[in-house]
Structures are given as structure tokens and as C-alpha cells.
Amino acid sequence: MNRIIIALIKNRKIVVFVVVLFMILGIYTFTMIPKQENPDTSMPAAILTTVYPGASPTTIEETVGKEIEDAISALPDIDELMTTCMNSVCITVIIYDLDVDWTQSKNELYRTIDALESRLPDGCLPIEVNTDVIKDKQFIISLSGENYTGEELAEYGQAIKEEIEKVDGIAKVTVEGQIPKEIQVVCDISKLDMYDLSLDRIGDLLMAQNLSIPSGSINYSSGEISVNTPAKFTSLDDINNIIVSAASEGVGFVKLSDIATVSEVESASYHYMQDGKSAILISGTFDEGLNAVAVGKRLRKTIEQTKQDIPEDILFHEVTFSPEDTRQRISDFIVNLVQSIVLIVLVVMFGIKFKNGVVISLALPLAIFSTFIAMYLLHIEFHFISIAALIISLGILVDNAIVVSEAIQQNLNEGMNRLKSILNAVRITAVPVLTSTLTTIITFGILMFSGGIAGRIVQAIPIVVIAALISSYIIAMFIIPVFAYMLFEPENTNPEGRLGWTVRVKEKAAIKPLFTKLLNVGLKHKAATMIIMTATLVVGIGLA
């Protein structure tokens, strides 16, 4: 360490240049670090929805549910698998281990589903896969208007969605709230009895008439084209004209319209309201690992442009817009950080020469900027947890610098030359300061082994604090001595042999005399001191 410090002192101009460059790099990385409102707490999970029209819960469980569970259960890293079967639908929920490689697991899941669909019964619709089970919406916008139907609002919402999807950094945009429609067939029971028909028979006929039927293939020189005969319903007339039975007299046929009323109705039992008016919602998420504040600025510009393209009597309301919340939180953090730095510097300056205080205070922003660089390299985002970790770190970042600086100043006061004072101070303080730093690192490092969602939430705390502490130690051991060599001076003594203004300030504040008195009382009454200390420990354990 002596050789390193001597080399740094000899090249102190380069050291100053590197420190300034490092601060500039820290400011730059601060602007580049992804900023989110909350840490990512999404679970690696998927929901599979399989529709088998007309099938009973028992049939779906036997023919669909078991097939899906058998195929999915063979996949690795699955923590829990749950299947629920209802009329015409089977829902499978897959929860993976938290530490799984989610990208790889999703690819394996899609491959398994592709192979599985060929084994499902005819008439099953393709399996719908949702892998964004728990995903925070970065923005939610509602469109409402008294003079517009849900369908019309949804058209405007779709147009806005298409514009938003063009913004760089937008992962997914959805339009919700449009009440879906369905075809309702209301049968006349008396007519069903007349023609000896059942509801099951009508359901089977509807399903059979609404299928695409394979009709062979066309072979040509470079391949083959499969041909299907389309039999999908395209209008209500197609459904009304389905032949359901022969007439009772044996002449003619019975159409569905003869025994039932076919109509298009709204199927949803709920819809969104904004200030008492029907509304649709436009919501979306951002790509992972991006700066939400920067994406939000681009999104804001697009939103303001699209507002001009919708009628004035459509109410445009932002339910939530998290990029601006994130920007406000980051701004509040910067204010809190500056306030904390100012207060810490004032405390450091109390009873210490101005130049010494400047050198010690340098350790604080330098350690913070170093932490920004570490966060950027380790892909730690700015959110309320990492911000809290930085604020926690502020109070302990200058401790190492204070210890080393005071040791250097004490050596100077005793008459040592500058270089010897610095080398002696570093030799004396290196191991104790390292030990103190390591104990704090171990304390926070335990949080890195926390499991579950809670562990994922707090994982930024130990990383940020440890990065800050390591930076603080390096700065105290190697950077502070260089600036101390340039700025520190021995404290002058007055004719009475007392040191200069710093000690007089301390004595005036009665810090040293008060401490001495308390120490003497404790040494004089050792038994009482031990009893009070033990009682305090017991009470603390009890309260814990």
C-alpha cells in the first residue's frame, strides 16, 4: 500500500484528473441507469386457456385437462401446476421457480404446447398462452363520452393503440372495456318436443356446421398445399338456415329459425365507467431494462399528438402514468441526496479545518458516483428500494474518510512530515477500517440470500450498499491521502501550548469534557455500569 500511495502522490495531477473524469462518468451513468417506479416483482408463471365448445366439465377434464397436465408436468423448474375445468373451457395455471431462466422456460412451454395440440380432441380451439400473468401497467388511459357507444370508443382506442405501439420501448398495448358480443340461440321448448329435438342435438349441429373441413391437398413440383372447405358462419342468416330435422310429414326440412330465435347480444356482465360514463381503457407496459422516464417522455409526445385526432367531446383521462411518478420520485431523491450531503458536510466541518472538511466531504459524492457506475454495470435499476439503499449508505460513506483524515492530521500535529504522516496513518488505520467495512458488508450481504418475492424486492439493498462501502474504503485508503498531501497543514499552537481554533471549538462545545466525565463515572462504578448494560440488553431482547 505504501508503494501505491507514494506512486499516487507523485502523480497527483493525474489522480485529480481521474477523479474529475470519474465524477463525470458517474453523472453520465446516472442518466443511463434504467428508472422504474417499483422493483420487478412479477412471478414466472403462465395461464393456458383451452376452449372446447359444448363439452362438459367431466369430458374436458378427461380429454383435455389430463393431456395438458401430463405434458406440462414433464417440464423442468415447475413449482406448482393447477387445472380447473368448466363448461367448454379448461384453464391451467403454471407457476415456475423464482430463479428459473424465464426466457428459456417460455420457449420450452411453447414448444410443448405446439406438440400437444395435435393430441387434443377435434373441435378444441388452439390453446391460448398468457405469460404476462403479473405485470405492472406503466400507463392506463380511459376514453369516455356520452354520445359514443363502446364500439365507437373502441375504434378510437384502437387507433390510439396503433400510434402508441410505434413508440420505441413500448412492449405491449391493450384496449379493454369494449363489451364483446355473442350469438344467442333461444329455443322454443314446445317446438323442440314437436320435432323430437334436444338442446344437446342443437349444440352438436351448431358446432359441426362451424368447422373448416380438410378436403385433401394439391401436389406440385416443389411441395404440397393443404385445402380446407370453409364452413364458418359469416352471418345470422347462415345460422338461421341450419337444417335441424326433417318435417313431421316427411316433406321438407326444419330450419333452426323454425324452432329458435337467433340474435346478437352483448355478452359481458361488466364494463368500465369513468365519472359515470361508459369507458374503454388503453393500457400498456414497457420493455424490460429500459429507462421508464425516457420512454415516458416519448410516449407523452405521442399521446399529445393523438389527442388532437379524436373528437373534443371524447373525454381523455389518464388513470395512471407511472413514468411521471418515477421522474418525480427520482427528483425527490436528488433533492434528498443534496440535502443529506449538505448536512453531512456541515457536521464534518464542525470542529475541523475547512480544507480538511473539503477533503473529507469529497469522499461522499465520489463514492455515490462510483455506486452509480456499479449499479449501471450490475444492471440495478433506480426504483424506491435502490433509492432507499443509497440514502441508507450516505451516513456511513464518510466514516472511513474521517478516520484516515484525522489520523493524518494527528501525525502532522505531532511534527511528522506530510508523506510520513500519510503513510503512518494508512498503516495504522488500514486493517481496522477494513474490518469495520467488512462487518457492515456482511450485515447487509445476508439480505442477498433472502428467498421468494421478498428477496427479489430487497435484493438491490445489499448490492447498492456493498458497492458504496467498497468505494468508500478505496477512496479513504488511496484518494484521501493524495488530497491530504496537497491540502493538509499542521494545526498551529498558541503561546499557552493549546492547539488552534478547532480544539477551542470542541472545548467550547463541551464535547470532550462531557465525554471525559461520563467515562470517569463509568469506570468508577463498573458494577452499576455492567448491570445497566445487561438490563438494557434484556429489555431490548424482550421488545424484539
Image (cartoon, grey):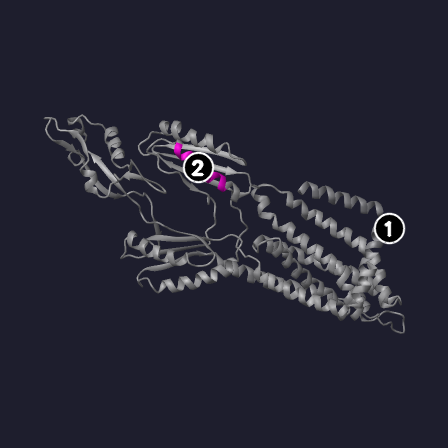
Can residue 277 be seen at all in this image of the molecule? no
Does the magenta-highlighted stretch encompass residue 64? no
Left or right: residue 150 versus residue 41 is: left
Q: Main secondary structure of the magenta part?
A: helix
Left or right: residue 80 versus residue 542 is: left
Residue 1 drawn at (x, y percent): 81, 58
Kindly identify the amino acid type of the residue bearing the numbered disc 1. Lys
* Residue 296, above or below 202: below
Quarter of the image for residue 3 reads bottom right
Quarter of the image for residue 126 reads top left
Q: Dot 2, crowdedness within 10 Å: few (<14), some or many (≥20)?
A: some
In this view of the protein, which residue sits in the foreground, 40 or 504?
40
Does the magenta-highlighted stretch encompass residue 115? yes
Going 58% across and 60% down the picture, which residue do you hit?
333
* Residue 250, above or below 483: above
- Residues in magenta? 106-118
Left or right: residue 277 versus residue 76 is: left
Number of residue marks: 2
Q: Which residue is mark 1?
A: 524
Split into 4 quadrants, where in the image is the C terminus? top right
Disc number for residue 113: 2
Residue 240 drawn at (x, y percent): 18, 38
